[in-house]
């Protein structure tokens, strides 16, 4: 039974408020003697313009208490006490019967969510900011899928613009084919940097770059072949990162795909009479909405990101009929996306309100001296390698005979990085400290993996006990607190999805780990004379493992069965 929902339904039967809004208000009291769930009446006081204490008392008197052990009124709160043995039995049996499906719902059935994330630039290294977007997007994909939505994972590659004319020019002048095949990103970056250095000495190079981009737009065979080669080789390098983090996409359509659809957009803008000229550029004026103009075409007649993003949104609505279209980008881009969404609104697309920008912060490093090569982009490669090496070093010290220890080290290290990226609210900046994020103590990925491994070890040593568990014997404070947090899993998923905030799930994982740590530190689990109690506690451990595994999967982390 979903007890929180049951409380909400009881309140809903007495007040005219949406059930979901009531659920969001329900709290778990800080002390067990205050009940299992509490409903604060402060919001009702604003609606009914009455004292919240009086509202709470009157509501409590009207509530049918048959479904609860006890219902009390304390100040502005209605406190609900439930049958503990029923809660424990129902929760643990539900977890074990549903297994990997525990926490799933059909809230999103029949609805499509589009999520644009990662979206690195062709010809440039995959950097730590790209990984931030990638991991947030992947977690949102997992969360929405868990709630029954159909999710389209969209990698909107940065593969168009005048820079590619310059890149073609640079490669034809100074490129090395062998170097391109061996280390494509470094070679493309090298010649692109050289182009700009030489262009400062010879301004005709800029004209040459523009000429090559014009040839590319006109589908010149040589220009197209080189562009496609740069794109394919870059994507090959990006896939190496995606494979490490087990990231998949449904589409790699980049900016280039939408270029031939822009003229139709301009015709539509003119029909709506919302296209203006400003200093030679084509813009949509947004001053009445306290925003700068949205520039679509520069004075050199080159379309820019905004025009392509507008046609991309229109294309996605036509092809996916999305319920929501989510863009995962750096937080400073929020104004840009407000402009894009406002232009869509001015074009009278009612679905513009369903487009959402999800912002994230910056990634910094506590000590760059830990990395052997300069540049944020290569730091990502160093970060992954150093993390794996450090974990493997610890395994060799503590458990040198562990099977598949290289694979285990990579899982723990990669999980540690994911956990660090998603541990705090996404718009908060991240400061990487390898020593901290790879520690098996504190609020880290390895700490959670360690406790999961301890729990699995207990189950292995406990073996099969041929006796039915007596859940009534699980009556300690630690056991009840652990069960209650496990029962909250579905609600936490919904909160994380509703707020588009993976850190809600990460914080939940830490809370489950901490409550399990407290439980097993206080209570014996093995070799108990009372076999019914022993079996009940082992069932609790098994349920905890299942929830930890399911929750970690929702932020993109695979559990390690033995460390």
Image (cartoon, rainbow, N blue to C red):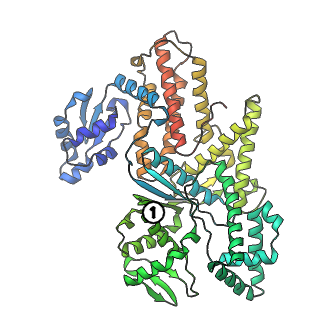
| In-image side of 445 versus 221 (left or right) | left
Q: Which of 517 and 130 is in front in this view?
A: 130
SS class, disc 1: helix
Q: How crowded is mark 1: few (under 14 residues within 10 Å), some or many (20 or more)?
A: few
Please state the horizontal and vertical placement of residue 73, each as a whole percent of the image.
Answer: 23, 35
Quadrant in which residue 120 is drawn: bottom right
Q: Residue at x 68, y 48 (%)?
A: 434
Please state the horizontal and vertical placement of residue 10, each as a whole percent of the image.
Answer: 23, 38
Picture quarter with the N terminus: top left
Q: Residue at x 23, y 49 (%)?
A: 17
Placement of 230 over or under 25, stated as above or below: below
Residue on which the image places disc 1? 319
Q: Determine the residue located farthest toward the bottom in the rendered image.
A: 279
Q: Residue at x 43, y 49 (%)?
A: 149
Determine if residue 285 is in view.
no
Please state the horizontal and vertical placement of residue 173, each as a whole percent of the image.
Answer: 80, 78
Q: Residue at x 50, y 47 (%)?
A: 142
Placement of 296 over or under 67, stated as above or below: below
């Amino acid at each position: 039974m979903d007890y929180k929902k049951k409380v909400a339904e009881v309140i809903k039967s007495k007040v005219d408020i949406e059930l979901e809004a009531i659920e969001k208000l329900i709290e778990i009291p800080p002390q067990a003697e205050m009940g299992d769930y509490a409903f604060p009446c402060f919001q009702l006081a604003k609606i009914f313009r009455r004292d919240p204490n009086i509202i709470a008392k009157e509501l409590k008197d009207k509530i049918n208490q048959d479904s609860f052990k006890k219902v009390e009124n304390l100040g502005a709160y209605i406190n609900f006490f439930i049958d503990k043995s029923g809660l424990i039995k129902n929760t643990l049996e539900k977890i074990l019967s549903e297994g990997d499906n525990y926490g799933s719902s059909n809230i999103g059935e029949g609805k499509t969510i589009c999520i644009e994330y990662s979206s690195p630039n062709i010809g440039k290294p995959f950097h730590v900011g790209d990984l931030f977007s990638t991991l947030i997007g992947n977690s949102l994909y997992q969360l929405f899928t868990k709630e029954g939505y159909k999710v389209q994972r969209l990698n909107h590659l940065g593969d168009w613009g005048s820079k590619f004319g310059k890149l073609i020019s640079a490669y034809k002048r100074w490129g090395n084919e062998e170097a391109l095949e061996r280390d494509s990103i470094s070679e493309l970056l090298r010649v692109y940097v050289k182009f700009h250095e030489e262009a400062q000495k010879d301004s005709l190079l800029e004209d040459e770059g523009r000429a090559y981009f014009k040839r590319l737009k006109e589908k010149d065979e040589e220009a197209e072949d080189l562009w496609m080669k740069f794109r394919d080789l870059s994507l090959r390098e990006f896939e190496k990162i995606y494979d490490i983090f087990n990231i998949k996409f449904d589409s790699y359509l980049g900016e280039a795909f939408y270029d031939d659809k822009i003229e139709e957009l301009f015709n539509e803008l003119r029909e709506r009479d919302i296209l203006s000229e400003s200093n030679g550029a084509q813009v949509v004026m947004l001053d009445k909405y306290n925003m700068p103009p949205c520039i679509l075409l520069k004075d050199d007649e080159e379309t820019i990101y905004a025009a392509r993003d507008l046609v991309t949104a229109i294309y996605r609505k036509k092809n996916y009929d999305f319920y929501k279209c989510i863009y995962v980008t750096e937080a400073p881009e929020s104004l840009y996306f407000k402009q894009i969404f406002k232009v869509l609104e001015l074009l009278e697309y009612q679905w513009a309100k369903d487009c959402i920008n999800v912002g994230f912060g910056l990634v910094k490093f506590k000590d760059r001296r830990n990395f052997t090569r300069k540049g944020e982009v290569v730091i990502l490669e160093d970060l992954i390698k150093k993390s794996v090496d450090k974990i493997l070093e610890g395994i060799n010290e503590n458990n040198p005979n562990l099977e598949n220890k290289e694979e285990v080290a990579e899982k723990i290290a990669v999980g540690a990085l994911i956990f660090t990226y998603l541990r705090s609210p996404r718009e908060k900046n991240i400061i990487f400290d390898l020593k901290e994020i790879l520690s098996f103590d504190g609020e880290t990925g390895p700490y959670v993996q360690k406790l999961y491994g301890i729990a699995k070890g207990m189950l292995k040593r406990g073996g099969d006990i041929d006796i039915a568990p007596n859940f009534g014997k699980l009556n300690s404070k630690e056991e009840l607190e652990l069960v209650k947090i496990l029962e909250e899993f579905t609600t936490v998923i919904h909160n994380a999805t509703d707020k588009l905030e993976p850190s809600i799930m990460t914080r939940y994982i830490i809370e489950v780990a901490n409550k399990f740590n407290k439980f097993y530190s206080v209570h014996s689990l093995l070799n108990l004379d009372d076999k019914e109690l022993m079996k009940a506690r082992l069932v609790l451990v098994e349920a905890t493992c299942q929830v930890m595994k399911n929750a970690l999967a929702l932020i993109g982390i695979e559990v390690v069965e033995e460390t």
